[in-house]
């Protein structure tokens, strides 16, 4: 297991978000941004799990990683 304050790659970020954790990148400019997984329930319009992004303004939007995000090694777990 990786210590909480150490950085890691996207494969570990994906491992964590699949376990209901939130992760962010040190390299992202905005404070308070993070990604997580949404698992749809019977009230959801979506039918499969998806990754979402929490913006600096408190908005939640679907998220798809860029090449830079996939290859980055500056991911950290966040609250």
Image (cartoon, rainbow, N blue to C red):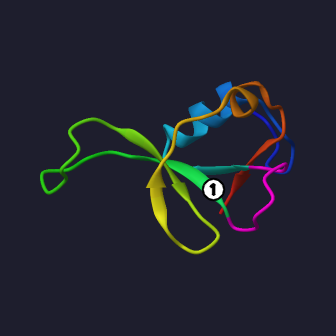
Task: From the image, tell me which residue sits under label 1.
Answer: 34
Q: Quadrant of residue 78?
A: bottom right
- Looking at the image, residue 75 lies above or below residue 10: below
User: Could you tell me residue 34's position as x and y percent?
Assistant: 63, 56
Looking at this view, name the residue that lies furthest to the left.
42
Above or below residue 21? Residue 10 is above
Query: From the viewer's perspective, is 66 left or right of 54?
Result: right
Magenta residues, dominant SS class:
loop
**SS of the residue under disc 1:** strand
Give the number of callouts.
1
User: Height in image: 32 above or below 9?
Assistant: below
Q: Give the residue at x 65% y 32%.
A: 66
Residue 74 x %, y %: 84, 40
Q: Is residue 13 left or right of residue 42?
A: right
Asked if the magenta segment contains residue 61, the reply would be no
Q: Which residue occupies the extreme bottom position in the image?
A: 57
* Whole-percent x, y for residue 17 in the image: 54, 42
Residue 24: x %, y % from top left: 70, 51
As rendered, which of 16 and 70 lies closer to the eye? Answer: 70
Estimate how packed mark 1 is, as few (under 14), some (14 to 19) or many (20 or more) residues with alpha carbons within 10 Å: many
- The residue that appears at 59% across and 64% down in the rendered structure is 55
Give the magenta range. Answer: 25-32
> Which image quadrant is residue 72 in?
top right
* Image quarter in which the N terminus is found: top right
In the picture, the quarter occupied by the C terminus is bottom right
């Amino acid at each position: 297991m990786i210590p909480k304050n150490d950085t890691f790659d996207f494969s570990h970020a994906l491992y964590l978000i699949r376990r209901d954790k939130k992760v962010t990148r040190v390299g992202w400019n905005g404070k308070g941004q993070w990604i997580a997984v949404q698992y749809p329930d019977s009230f959801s319009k979506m039918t499969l799990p998806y990754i979402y992004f929490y913006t600096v303004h408190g908005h939640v939007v679907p998220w798809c990683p860029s090449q830079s995000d996939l290859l980055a090694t500056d991911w950290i777990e966040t609250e």
